[in-house]
Amino acid sequence: MQSFAVIPAAGKSRRMGQDKLSLAWGDRSIIQTTIDAWLSSQVTRIIVVVDPENLELIDHLNGLDIDVVVPISSPPQMKDSVIAGLVHIKQTYGPTGKDAWLLAPADMPGLTPAAIDQLLQEYRTDAHNIFVPEYEQQTGHPVLFPWKYADQVQRLTANQGINHLTETCPKRLIPIAGVQKPVDIDTPAEYQQALTEHSQTNDQFKED
């Protein structure tokens, strides 16, 4: 079984006022920390879709063991970034019906390899459903899709997002124990709050 992480990273960061993905997170950046979680998981390959106009981010990702997909033009919506990533996977890796793809935002430094691996383990025993993680009864990311849903993404209408699949197709909620729900970071206030919580957690581990 092959599994592919699709990470849309072509947003404009309008609410942040600057490219949020390259902002500092400890001794790494937000997107590097997010990718580190994927690299530490059992996922087969990581695909990051980047806006062709964001040359700084493209350079920022240089040297990481990932596939950086740069569309010819800027993806209008996140769905378009996902499609670009899925097309790349299909053309490069030839996935089959037993394979899977997982989706999560690029601005999610709280993502953990344990959550990713738990979804993959569940999929190995049930390759038919979409798998949605549940953190203390709240759904979150990443979401795992059987490969068959890749074609359905391209058939979504203009006003339908990826969540249309999780709302209308068979799915299972997978409780993730002992892990906080990872949140994305969109505004300066959210960034500062997340940094503070991250620093407090690190200090607690140091004291322990």
Image (tube, rainbow, N blue to C red):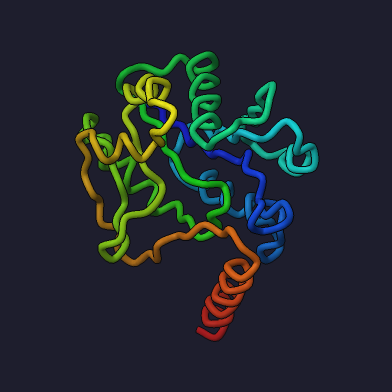
Residue 87 in percent (x, y) is at 51, 19
* Residue farthest toward the front in the current orientation of the protein: 159
Residue 89 in percent (x, y) is at 51, 22
Foreground of the two, 96 or 53: 53
Residue 132 in percent (x, y) is at 30, 46
Exactly how many numbered labels are in the figure?
A: 0
Question: From the viewer's perspective, is 128 left or right of 98?
Answer: left
* Screen quadrant of the N terminus: top left
The residue at the point 30 percent across, 61 percent down is 138
The residue at the point 33 percent across, 25 percent down is 149
Residue 175 in percent (x, y) is at 25, 57
The residue at the point 40 percent across, 50 percent down is 141
The relative height of residue 36 versus residue 191 in the rendered view (above or below) is: above
The relative height of residue 1 versus residue 200 in the rendered view (above or below) is: above
The residue at the point 37 percent across, 46 percent down is 117
The relative height of residue 92 versus residue 159 in the rendered view (above or below) is: above
Q: Quadrant of residue 97?
A: top left
Question: From the viewer's perspective, is 112 left or right of 164?
Answer: right
